[in-house]
Amino acid sequence: MAYIKNTELLPERRGIASLVKSQDQSEQISRASRRGRRFGRISRQRLLVWLLSLAVLFSIYLTYFGLKIHFHGGISSLREVKKELPVTNASEQPRTKSRRPRFSPCEVSFLDSVTYLREPKDNMKFTDFSLDYVERDDKTHLNGSIEARFGGHQTLREREQSYHATNQTIHCGFVSGPDGFPTTGFDLDDKDKKYMITCKVVVSSCIFGSSDFLRRPTSKVISDYSKKNVCFVMFVDEQTLLKLSAEGNVPDAEGKIGLWRMVVVKNLPYEDMRKTGKVPKFLSHRLFPSSRYSIWLDSKLRLNADPMLIIEYFLWRAGAEYAISNHYTRHCVWEEVLQNKRLNKYNHTAIDEQFHLYKSDGLTKFDSSDPNNPLPSFVPEGSFIVRAHTSMSNLFSCLWFNEVDRFTSRDQLSFAYTYLKLRRLNPSRNFYVNMFKDCERRTITKLFRHRTDA
């Protein structure tokens, strides 16, 4: 019987054992899942820590070494890529960091207004003589043929004679060839010539070869008197006018864009656009034969002052007939020669030939300690010139232009030689030059960079 009872109870015991076993398995699965969840949380936390650590290290790398990426087939930094981005304003150039030292403007004590401004009577101290200009050149070239040149064919003897401040006929551009030859360049429309001959006071500039954007004078600082009585003339070639028109600068019915009267020059006299730009820069007395005063500013400058106040301050008040600023860093022609070569501004051989002639003809280094220096610097900045169209001023302008025509277009190389030679050969006839501080030029003009896509 006992055996039977034990046999009957076996299934029940087996059920209880199975239940206990299943409970144990459930508890094991539960513990395993909890351990899995804890391990998952720990893994995710470690993963986030690693990701954050990598992000910090990556940011440090960017800070010190800069991000390098492939751009247009090459390796460029973010800074370089930004330079390639399109500019939203077509009238302004992209801004890039410059390592050039900054130079600040300084105070210019202009009069408060032009209302009571009066031109002084003719100053008797200014040297007076008569200048005529060579209009036609029949001279032959070295090979026997006749070569018509805008500057003519000035001999060394004629060049030497032209430095004497006396009644004479000199080369000063606009020289035509013999009958039957085409013009030598800088051809203007008759309507523009008629307008220019009426100008008594002129502000002029030029853009050739689309080298710059159009910088309009700041209208709000220019008096109604100057707007009415001063001619603002911008000389351009046809290519530049088309480019400006495509950018929205279209002349009105009077040929004006703002205050600028646009005068188109055809048949440019030189292949070198810089040399062509010296024609309106130096020869304003020839382009505007009735003018008494002129202001020249390079196209990279915007005029921020009234022209009549400028003339009063730099000429009338200073008792000068010619005003130009000194260079902001260089004062000796020797330094200017080295800088032009260092930056490859012109053919080195041509610079050497010009410089050798100047040294052999008496040009000396600038000595800042010499109290007898006639100028505070032998190197001008050159982008801003104020002139009275007196005999000496006109002669100096012609002489300076002839040096540029004969040698290089780098006019800062020839300024001191031209001035010192004119002064040396005319000891009893003064030329009153006001070489003012360049910081004053920075006060009355705003400087821009040249167009980069020219």
Image: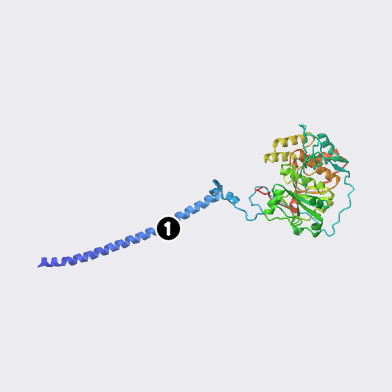
Identify which residue is drawn at 70% across, 47% down. Answer: 209
Q: Which three-letter amino acid code belongs to the residue tagged 1?
A: Gln
Residue furthest left as drawn: 1
Instruction: Tell me: 54 left or right of 266.
Output: left
Q: How many labels does the image show?
A: 1
Instruction: Tell me: 352 left or right of 15.
Output: right
- Residue 425, how many percent across, how many down? 85, 38
The residue carrying mark 1 is: 45
Identify which residue is drawn at 84% across, 37% down. Answer: 161
Q: Is residue 314 visible?
A: no
Under circle 1, the secondary element is helix
Instruction: Tell me: 172 left or right of 91.
Output: right
In the picture, the quarter occupied by the N terminus is: bottom left
- Residue 236, how many percent across, how many down? 73, 49
In this view, the residue in front, 112 or 396, is 396
In this view, the residue in front, 91 or 430, is 91
**In this view, 417 is above or below 451:** above
Q: How crowded is mark 1: few (under 14 residues within 10 Å), some or many (20 or more)?
A: few
Q: Can residue 75 be seen in this view?
A: yes
**In this view, 157 is above or below 206:** above
Residue furthest right as drawn: 124
Identify which residue is drawn at 34% across, 61% down. Answer: 33
